[in-house]
């Protein structure tokens, strides 16, 4: 379980995905902030800290490190 990945896909309805992909980028991003539509929709419920957050990134897997270690073991 060390490298297990739990994924959640709360907005996977294909119609929603098609619609969101059709929107212009300025609806999705604003001044370096992602998830604009979601943030705007939940504006009155989100704390200011969450609304202004720009540092959150997706899950970073250790793929490169694992492949490098495997390569070193194989060629050593």
Image (cartoon, helix red, strand yellow):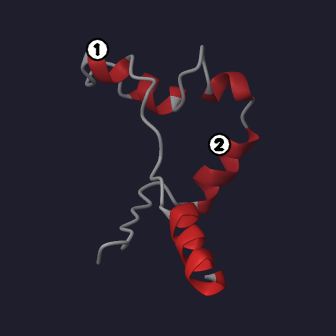
Q: Residue at x 72, y 34 (%)?
A: 23
Q: Nearer the viewer, residue 4 or 13?
A: 4
Q: Which residue is drawn at 36% across and 73% down?
A: 4
Is 44 located above or below residue 2 in the figure? above
In the image as oriented, which residue stretches furthest toward the bottom? 74
Q: Quadrant of the N terminus?
A: bottom left
Report whether 57 appears left or right of 42: right
- In percent of width and height, residue 54 lies at 45, 24
Label 2: how many Cα within 10 Å (few below 14, some 14–19, many 20+): some
Circles 2 and 1: CB atoms closer than 8 Å: no
Is the residue 53 above or below the residue 7 in the image? above
The residue under label 1 is 48
In front of the other: 39 or 58: 58
Quick one: SS at disc 1? helix
Q: In the image, residue 6 lies at what x, y percent?
A: 36, 67
Quadrant of res 68: bottom right
The x, y position of residue 18, in whole percent, is: 69, 52
Relative to 63, 3 lies left or right: left
Q: In this view, does 49 lie to the left or right of 25?
A: left
Q: Determine which of the numbered discs, if any, sits on residue 16 in the image.
A: none
Position in image of residue 9 (x %, y %): 44, 60
* Residue beneath disc 2: 20
Which residue occupies the extreme front position in the image?
Answer: 76
């Amino acid at each position: 379980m060390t490298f297990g990945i739990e994924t959640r896909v709360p907005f996977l309805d294909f119609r929603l995905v098609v619609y969101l992909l059709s929107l212009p980028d300025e609806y999705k991003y604003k001044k370096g902030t992602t998830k604009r539509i979601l943030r705007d929709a939940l504006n009155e419920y989100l704390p200011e800290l969450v609304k202004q957050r720009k540092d959150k990134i997706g899950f970073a897997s250790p793929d490169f490190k694992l492949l490098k270690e495997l390569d070193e073991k194989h060629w050593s």
